[in-house]
């Protein structure tokens, strides 16, 4: 259940970041306001996650997955080009997050 809440916080944070980009520097203020809404929901959900999960583990998964998902989404939404270094970075983030989640002893409290 705690990982489902963490995944929800991650998805909301990714949506917020993508909406902030789509707002074009707040020229489209409705998207900027939606971004603030999703950041708020993400933060509140993440706070519930931290009641049951080690902060180091939770933040590593939250930030790592968020970065990777935003990078991948930007390829489709804004035609961002990935070179070998960007692809390698996303893969390393994925592997690091997986290692922390699966193999680390700093798990759920």
Image (cartoon, helix red, strand yellow):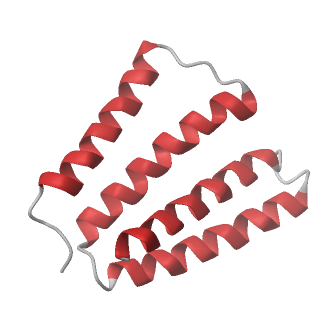
Quadrant in the picture for the N terminus: bottom left
Residue in the image at 73% along x and 34% along y: 77
Percent position (x, y) of residue 47? 43, 81
In the image, residue 67 above or below residue 105: above
Q: Quick check: 86 above or below 46?
A: above
Q: Position of residue 19 (x, y in %)?
A: 74, 53
Q: Position of residue 86 (x, y in %)?
A: 45, 23
Q: Is residue 24 above or below residue 108?
A: above
Q: Is residue 1 left or right of residue 57?
A: right
Residue 95 drawn at (x, y percent): 27, 38
- Count up the numbered dots: 0
Q: Residue at x 43, y 23 (%)?
A: 87
8 or 84, which is in the foreground?
A: 8
Report the side of 24 relative to 94 (left or right): right
Farthest residue to the left: give it: 105
Q: At 32% from the left edge and 86% from the top edge, which residue is drawn?
A: 51
Q: Which residue appears at 64% of the width and 28% of the height?
A: 75
Q: Residue furthest top?
A: 84
In the rendered image, which quarter contains the C terminus? bottom left
The image quadrant that residue 91 belongs to is top left
């Amino acid at each position: 259940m705690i990982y489902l809440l963490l995944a929800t916080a991650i998805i909301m944070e990714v949506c917020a970041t993508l909406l902030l980009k789509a707002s074009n520097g707040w020229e489209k203020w409705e998207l900027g306001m939606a971004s603030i809404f999703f950041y708020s929901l993400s933060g509140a959900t993440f706070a519930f996650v931290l009641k049951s999960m080690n902060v180091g583990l939770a933040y590593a998964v939250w930030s790592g997955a968020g970065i990777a998902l935003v990078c991948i989404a930007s390829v489709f939404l804004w035609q961002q080009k990935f070179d070998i270094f960007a692809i390698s970075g996303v893969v390393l983030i994925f592997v690091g997050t997986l290692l922390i989640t699966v193999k680390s002893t700093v798990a759920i409290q």
